[in-house]
Image (cartoon, rainbow, N blue to C red):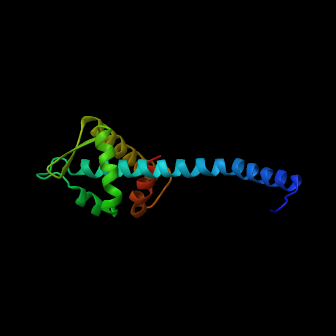
Amino acid sequence: MVNVPPAMLFLLGAVCLLAALLARPAFRFVRRWRNARQRMLVEDILKRILSHSGRAALPTPETIGGALGISQKRLWPTIVEMERRGLLTSREGRLDLTPEGRTWALQIVRAHRLWETWLATEAGVALPHLHEIAESKEHS
């Protein structure tokens, strides 16, 4: 049996406690980052479905995933959660927005357009770069 001095045990406990206290902010940051990333995905899905409104055929998860460049494995849990939250409905493999989902999608589109307007008139961003920058800013 190994005999560990009490001072060593105290030091080990202090190091573990310090590590736990320092790690908490990092965990919060990672959680916030993951939540923001998930919210951006939800908003992008809503925008894609909205862009298909008025067309003869509603979009499918495959067309949404292809347009956003994400796998079905990542897309499906998000679609299920969005349906549970009342943002969209799925019928016969097609996705459609609920009134709440449509309202949220329209807010994102409006934010995008406002960013484009501001970037063009106030920030002096060149036209070829407007859409790309507004695309990243619309989620904030």
Drawn side of residue 76 relative to residue 93, left or right? right
> How many marks can you see?
0
Q: Residue furthest top?
A: 99
Task: Tell me which corner region of the image, top left, top right, bottom left or bottom right, holds residue 81.
Answer: top left
x and y percentages locating residue 26 in the rendered image = 63, 52
Drawn side of residue 5 relative to residue 29, left or right? right
x and y percentages locating residue 4 in the rendered image = 85, 58
Which sits in the foreground, 104 or 72?
A: 72
Identify the residue at image location x=74%, y=52%.
16
Can you say which quadrant of the picture contains the N terminus? bottom right
x and y percentages locating residue 14 in the rendered image = 80, 50
Task: Tell me which corner region of the image, top left, top right, bottom left or bottom right, holds residue 98.
Answer: top left
Which sits in the foreground, 47 or 118?
A: 47
Which sits in the foreground, 8 or 21?
A: 8
Q: Residue furthest left?
A: 56
x and y percentages locating residue 69 in the rendered image = 33, 64
Identify the residue at image location x=87%, y=52%.
6
